[in-house]
Image (cartoon, helix red, strand yellow):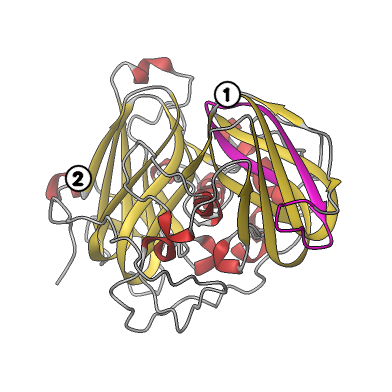
Amino acid sequence: MSDTLKTTWVAVSSLIAVLACTPAHAVFQVTTPDPTERSTFDIDASKFPYNMSRGRLGASVHVYGAEATPVYSIDLTGGTVDPNTSEHALISDDHSISYPLKKNHINFVFDLPHISEISLFNFFNFESEGTVTVFYSETAPKSDGTGDWKPAGEGIPYAGDGVVRVPFTPVKARYFRVDFDTTRLGRVGALGLFGNENPGRIDQVTKFRVPRTELPPYRIIMNNLSSIYYGAKVSYINETEGKDATNAKEASLAAKMIIDDNCETYYEFQPTNESPIMVVDLGDTRAIRRLSTLFEATPGTFEFYVSNQLLEEFKVEGSRDVASPNIKSVDRSFFQNYPPFHIVHFDHTGAGRLSYNFNDVPARYLIMRFIPDAGARRLAPVSQLRINQFHVFGIYDPQIQPHPRAVSPEDPPNSPLRDVPVVPPVSN
């Protein structure tokens, strides 16, 4: 097993083994599990813990120390610059949307859908520095945020871009408060509260009726169609090519980290990979209107492609007629035969996020290719690309998936979605 896959597998096993609570605040520090405890090939989506701070599960968030904003004011302008100022984006499924820490002391109070056992808080940091502390309460706080708060652990200092991990002894509560005391202002996003709850069976979202064509932006980003919990999968990464069956299977398992709603886990491509490629299979063709990703990379170009069919350039294992085929390889002619759906250049080394909005496009397969700049390829053994999360959003039928606390503003802003500039490779 490669060093990268060992590191990533440690993340998988640690999360599944009830998210080990070793004191740590550096990026991606986890404990090594007992290798006899679980076979790597037994891991499936039903064992991944839920991020309980999610609006689609019924969680809500309130900010104290800064001006509160209505839920429908989430800014989805898109691109590599994030202008959002709404705290409600922090409980969406989109890790690319962050929130500005504009004051030296800001509190976030989370009301979970029910009493949950929580043992980990994490988030993705962009430029801010300071100390973060987690509190919990068994009773509802007052309207001003005060209440019977107990510390879940000591404050954790943090600095630098990337994941910040705040583990603590498991506590059972419905209300959690996260305090940010900053010495350098910046932005935070991809917040997560994890514990021992997992989805069990993944059968709640596999088919859609004819959806409504108009939904406000805040509803769209509550529905990540590429989530492992919705039955999506990473059906191909080009690092499985040329490997024996065991190593290829390990790489495929590790790639699940890209769609597990946890910014702390990731898939890191080998530095020798001159052009990382991955394919995400949504399970069936759906109308999509937003792509986003959270990553760490060297300078390079991201290319995104979409298809609503299993193209000839996709070579599969076994029969092509199975419901969810595993893709064995993607012929390089694919990138010559079809124009990219979207292209964006990342011009520095470090943490990044990007998003792209467009009018509805039918798609099942989302293909991403990263082409490092020529200078970046000489940085080996420095990694060229680490994908923390990859998201695909679309419209859905709220009668099947009603939001527990949907807000219906009288005059919500128009969705900032725009036309697709090039024709994607989709069938008629």
Residue 335's disc is 2
Q: The C terminus lies in which quarter of the figure?
A: bottom left
Is 351 situated above or below 392?
Answer: above
> Residue 275 at what x, y percent from top left?
33, 34
Of residues 322 and 46, the one nearer the viewer is: 46
Kind of residue sitting beneath label 1 = Gly
Which circle, 2 or 1, is nearer the viewer?
Answer: 1
Give how far apart the Cα atoms at labels 2 and 1 are.
36 Å
Is residue 166 toward the left or the right of residue 247 in the image? right
Q: Secondary structure at mark 2?
A: helix
Kind of residue sitting beneath label 2 = Phe
Write the residue at 84% across / 61% down: 138
Residue at label 1? 160
> Residue 305 at what x, y percent from top left?
25, 51
**Magenta run includes residue 132:** yes
Q: What span is in magenta?
A: 121-146
Q: Is residue 36 visible from the viewing direction of this image?
A: no
Write the residue at 32% across / 24% down: 347
Q: Secondary structure at mark 1?
A: loop
